[in-house]
Amino acid sequence: MNGNIKRTTSWAAWLLRHLLPNACALCGGDSDDALCRGCAAQFFGAAAAIARCHCCANPVSAAGLLCGACQAHRPTFDHTLVAADYALPVDQLVLQLKFGHRLALAPLCAGLLRDAVQSQADYALPALLCPVPLGPRRLAGRGYNQALEIARPLARGLGIALAAQLLVRVHDTAAQSSVAPEQRRQNIAGAFTVTDAALVAGRHIGVVDDVMTSGCTLNEVAATLKRHGAARVSNLVFARTPPH
């Protein structure tokens, strides 16, 4: 009986692969999974081996070190974990999710980020996850928050509660990508508030986002959470823009 079930399952899988062929989200080649083995190893396996500053996730010479920028001006957040660098071709996953309405890529990004988090054996998981919120205008224009779409499957994968509305954006700021680097901190200042301080007080909060560039948005989020009593704030971000 078990042998018949296994044969039926194998036949069904073969039939699905041929009737509904899947393509790698990065290279477009045939793949049974969202990423082919080659792309997964090249763009994510290698990225996981990079020594990164545990505070901001920029590359450093050896694991466990803080980068020079974090030594000089320590951010308000305590830790950052990323799945990959925001560079070709990985950036296309984010762009297609964010602007191409390919919501099916969110679970892929979440799975890769989950693997990166779980690869850090000494990392204590947050008690709660929350996404970086969009402002009402941008949310209405896009129709969804890509950070929330990543946070949902990430929370399930890590077994952590998700507070989707814990943070709200009270100022509809200009997109950080459209603002000069020296003005980004001012642009985002005071943009967020916490809806339930009791969920935050004394706890380790994980903040989920798709991309981290200057870190100003995540720093403002961390400052907001800590003003409401958060003991620790970690950033769980799919991709990190490399320093220039």
Image (tube, helix red, strand yellow):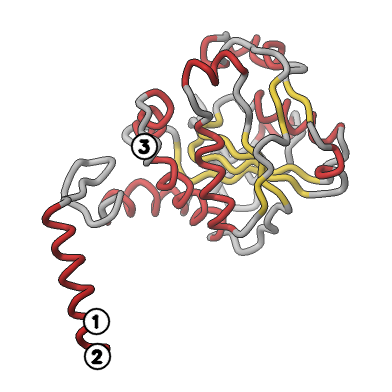
Residue at 57% x, 13% y is 137
| Residue 66, horizontal then vertical, whole percent | 67, 42
| Residue 13, horizontal then vertical, whole percent | 20, 65
Disc 1 residue type? Ile
Establish if 64 lies above or below 215: below
- Within 10 Å of disc 1 (Cα), the crowding (few <14, some 14-19, many 20+) is few
Establish if 240 lies above or below 19: above
Question: What mark, if any, has residue 1 been given in the picture?
Answer: 2
Residue 91 placement: quadrant:
top left
The residue tagged 1 is 5
What is the spatial separation of the Cα atoms under label 2 and label 3, in whole angstroms?
Answer: 44 Å
| Residue 64, horizontal then vertical, whole percent | 65, 52
Q: Earlier in the sequence, mark 3 or mark 1?
A: 1
- Within 10 Å of disc 3 (Cα), the crowding (few <14, some 14-19, many 20+) is some
Disc 3 residue type? Val
The residue tagged 3 is 90
Establish if 182 lies above or below 68: above
Residue farthest to the front, as pictured: 1
The image quadrant where one finds the N terminus is bottom left
